[in-house]
Image (cartoon, grey):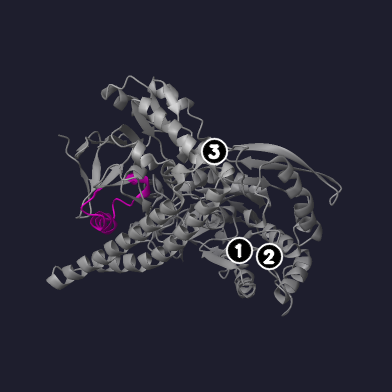
Amino acid sequence: MSRVVFLGPQRFRPTLVDVLDRLEVDGTVAAITAGWQEREQEVDELQDHIHRELVDLRLYERAEQVFFKDPELRDALQNKQRRLRALQTLYRQRLAHALKAAREVMCLDGREAFVREHRQAAIRAIRTLDRQHLTRVRRIHSEFDEQWTPTTRPAVASHCHELEELVARASVVAIAGGHVAILINRLRLFGFARLLARRTLVAWSAGAMALTERIVLFHDRPPQGPGDAEVLDAGLGVVDRIVALPHARRRLDLDDPVRVALLSRRFAPDLPALLDVGTELMHDGRRWRPGHKARALAHRGAVVELKRP
Amino acid sequence: MSHVFETFLADSPDAGKIDAFLSGRTVPLVEGDRVTFVFRAEADAVNLRHWIFGLPSSQPFERVEGTGLWHLTIDLPERSRVEYKIERVRGDEHVWLMDPLNPRVAHDPYGANSVCYGRGYVTPPWVQPDEEARPGSLEAVSVPSRVFGEKREIQVYLPARFRTRRRYPLLIVHDGHDYMRFASLKTVLDNLIHRLEIAPLIVALTHSPDRLNEYAADPRQADFLADELVPTLTARYPLIDRPDARVVMGASFGAVASLSSAWRRPGFYGGLLLQSGSFAFSDIGKHGRGPALDPVARFVNAFREDPRQPGSKVFVSCGIYESLIYENRSLVPVLQQAQLALRYVEARDGHNWENWRDRLRESLSWLFPGPLWMVYE
């Protein structure tokens, strides 16, 4: 298993260098900033912060090159994305009703057994919907991979070989946040599930989401719509038993016990981990170990501090 | 009347007690849905002058016997926001004053008004400067115009982290300078982009030296925007050169100019944001709003007859305390006929810039959805 550290957002109070120091990283840091899209190569601040040699893996740019050189694969990827979007729309429609029902039932007074049963059933319905959706998403990915084997196509393979060498030479791979769908698609295109196995990884925000088993999109107070958290995609699954919730303080209504409890129970037994500024959470290859400011959502509808060992 | 004020009055107030009562107190006094205005002056009469359509525009205060203290209580529904002045009458002298006991002030091109917040109204946090939000920049651009026979100077807002490698949607704003000064448009754009609630966009802040004519459904305005302004901007900036990435907006006469320009150029704009439009019409009788609105009424009559499809998404907002609420409500079924995506929002507010400011989040985030759900930096 990989050794993984999840951090909170790094823009205002970066803590990456502290983690690298503690991990005694003295070699190269390979950086993945594809989530920044067209700003991918603007890594000067990151470079200044870490006080180490940084190799920019440029996955966003490499993907653009692949799309240019291999239009057949590009079209196939776009077609896959269209299928995924259509699937997401259907899932979202069903999810909206299921979440509305669950919130209503959870707001009901009553400790009688039948009320509890209804609450549990409402949450079970959402969990089933999430699970079925993720299964369908995974099936679309695996069908695509079987048909196209992207990493074997010349336009991709040359990058994969180069990336494999760069990652192998690096002491640590740092994965920044940004656009989570663009990031996971680039990581998947270049076969990073394999490249990141048994490596030391430090990831924050969307970077952390991409390493988990499922990517959950969330915002409780969006300007449009009801703010229904939804499963977007499978992550790389480098780590398990966690749902990464970056910027939780800003994006979640943590004072609303119904919303907090629902989100927590929906993804149980995975740890719904809040990744806010200053947070640190480590996975040693077997289990999660809370670091600074590690917090999670609890079933009873509150936020709890995770005890450090 | 406010319970606090009623109790105070029952104690036979003198000058000292009035001083003590007013010291450190926020005025007007808001209790539930009742608002009590308080004014202290030597006067023959005192009136509340406001712009709440449907109420007499002048409402008399009552004097507290033997003192220079005046008061007036009105009902004001939850989340209302009302601008007002106080009229002091001494002999033949009628003076309109800002409320000296109320620090809340709203500015507009004609000056300023005092503001009363009803219970539950809160100034949205996204209109206040946020130090975490990266600021966009402003550039001056000169647009040669054959239509108007002169150059038109506009301002262009570029979002923070603007990159020429990326392409951006375009928002054209009528009365852009006023939106910047009185509706905090730059701060709002910076904040909503920072919060990922709207897409990074380029904004053309236009203004007219003769808005009462040019914005009154003048066909030249439609030509200027489509044939001169947009091509100039497209040549200079990395714009997404498609109708669905092009929105035109305005308030009052600016909303008329927006709708008229889009109606005259079907398929050119994807979206419209129309705030408190002066959509006078006379196809079922006189509009009664003076000759300046005659050309507007001719246009709106034609629009009501044949709305075409001015855009694929239209957001309309109006305050229920403005007289234009009737015209704006009347526009809704006409737009519904046009088979476009329509959002219509009413607010408990009047015909003023802060009403238009407060609607910017829900309207712009619908017209230019941001990457909120996808981006986690």
Task: Name above or below for residue B309 compared with residue B100.
Answer: below
Q: Is A254 inside the magenta-drawn segment?
A: yes
Q: Quadrant of the N terminus of chain B?
A: bottom left
Q: Mark 1 points at which residue?
A: B314
Q: Which residue is drawn at 17% across and 69% down?
A: A117
What amino acid is labelled 3 in the image?
A: Glu
What residue did someone put label 3 on?
Answer: A38
Pinpoint the chain carrying mark 2: B
Q: Are marks 1 and 2 in contact (CB under 8 Å)?
A: yes
Q: In this view, does A191 lie to the left or right of B201?
A: left
The residue at the point 50 percent across, 63 percent down is B348
Amino acid type indicated by mark 2: Pro
Of marks 2 and 3, the one in the foreground: 3
Mark 1, secondary structure of its residue: strand
Q: What stretch is highlighted in magenta?
A: A245-271
- Quarter of the view holding residue B233: top right
